[in-house]
Amino acid sequence: MTSKQRAYLRGLAMTIDPIYQVGKSSITPELTKGIDEALEARELIKVNVLKNCMDDPNEIAQIIAERTHSQVVQVIGKKLIFYRESKDKKKIELPVQKKK
């Protein structure tokens, strides 16, 4: 993913609310499955890490991205943004990388 595409996705993510929260039980199989399904339906999602979660948000983002085969767009404080292109319902058109 290019920096231009990442910036575009960050702009889109500004208007969406977090749909999942990571709490004190951290990353559970149910949470991973839910995020995976949400990525398939929406492509771009925001996840909130609650104060009672003792894990590092950057580590959580990497683990979730690995398990859901998605990309971490951005981690700001305790907000995580993920992107994965949908197999069936493609909604977001990323800017095309220009060839030199």
Image: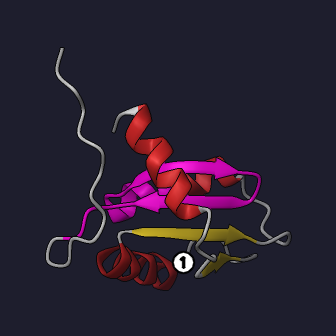
Which of 71 and 43 lies nearest the eye of the viewer? 43
- Relative side of 10 to 53, left or right: left
Figure quadrant of residue 32: bottom left
Q: Which residue is mark 1?
A: 28
Q: Residues within 10 Å of mark 1 (few under 14, many from 20)?
A: few
Position of 39 compared to 90: left or right? right
* Kind of residue at badge 1: Thr
Percent across and percent down for residue 69 are 31, 58
Frontmost residue, 22 versus 77: 77
Q: Residue at x 47, y 51 (%)?
A: 72
Residue at (27, 58) in percent of width and height: 93
Position in image of residue 43 (x %, y %): 35, 69
Figure label count = 1
Q: Note whether 31 is above or below 61 in the view shown.
A: below
Residue farthest along the top direction in this orientation: 100
Q: Position of residue 91 (x, y in %)?
A: 27, 71
- Residues rendered magenta in the picture: 63-86
SS class of the residue under badge 1?
Answer: loop
